[in-house]
Image (cartoon, rainbow, N blue to C red):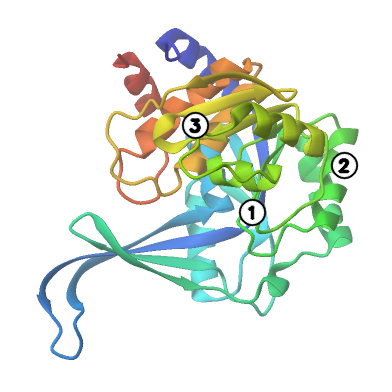
Amino acid sequence: MSISPSKAKALLKRIAGLRILVIGDVMLDHYIWGDATRISPEAPVPVIDIARDTWTAGGAANVAINVAGLGARCTVFGFIGGDDSGLRLRDILRGKGVETIGTSGGAMTIVKTRVMVQHQQLCRLDRESPASEYAADPAEAARLLAEAIRDSDAVVFSDYAKGLLTNGLVSGVTALARREKKFVALDPKPKNPLSFKGLDLMTPNKREALQLAGIEPGQGAPFPADRVCSRLQEKYATRNVVVTLGEDGMLLSSQGRVLKTIPTAAREIYDVSGAGDTALAGLVLALTSGAGLEEAAHFANAAAGVVVGKLGTATVTPGELLDYVQHAP
């Protein structure tokens, strides 16, 4: 059972009154679109005839534009360089109605370039500085973010293990958010082991959940949902855990107990880039607006179902989501 159009409409109405603060590794997603009809005489590789370039917000910045796309106000904090890519990213965020509180310095803005040939990704090219150059000073970050935390209904940490999120930053911001009684969520990356406890929501994918729980299932064994969720509760004491399972949907857990698995809402899948960001935005918005975990998961699942039906990093609008749930089976 998916979310009904009436419930989705009611949620969207409440979401329109929210403000969300996203903190994490922002980046610029660059797409090169073209075609390949011949092999290079210089090496056994295809020659790409480029038709066009497009740019959009990626990483934590994609979470932010998904929040804004669904109707809430949003502010994002992350490293945005003073280079051309940083200027482009700021323009994109401004155009989507997202405010920025950025750190900056000598490091380059993180850019992911994907080469797309006949609607298929051929390769990805990454430009970034060492992780240490993106780390924010916890005291300075707390000073910059104090007002934004007070003005927000929820704080979302979006970790892409690029260096911004450190234990000092996460613990300092979480303490400020807790003092203000704000909802706090984290999309974690085990590659960047953070020390945290008592958050409201965590959204790892299947592989990340296993790594965070310290569990290695046997070859071909089913996902050990009960063990994983119990272990995550012991280590992190997060109120709600939603494990994104890709084509298998979402696993919902509360206080370490598995509640249920809901199937994916996607009818067509063209590109999963950024779908996790969309699901995170949908979950946070729905939960912060008062929905229960299952209703929030169905809402987020529908939003992600729209996005994976688009090519490239994408967002979903309220109109698209309502149309999607209206025609849900």
| Rendering coords of residue 201 (x, y %) | 69, 32
- Residue beneath disc 1: 100
Judged left or right of residue 301, residue 291 is right
Q: In what element is the residue under mark 2? A: helix
Residue at x 76%, y 36% (from the top left corner): 151
Q: Helix, strand or loop at disc 3?
A: loop
* Relative image position of residue 153 (x, y in whole percent): 72, 31
Lateral position of residue 263 relative to residue 228, left or right: left
Q: Amino acid at mark 1?
A: Thr
Relative side of 104 to 73, left or right: right
Q: What residue do we see at 84% from left, 29% from top? A: 181
The amino acid type found where label 2 is placed reads Leu
On residue 70, which mark appears? 3
Residue 264 appears in view: yes
Q: Name the residue at the left extreme.
A: 37
Percent across and percent down for residue 100 are: 64, 54
**Residue where numbered disc 2 is placed:** 176
Residue found at the very far front of the displayed protein: 218
Density class for disc 2 (Cα within 10 Å; few <14, some 14-19, many ≥20) is some
* Lower position in the chain sequence, tag 2 or tag 3: 3
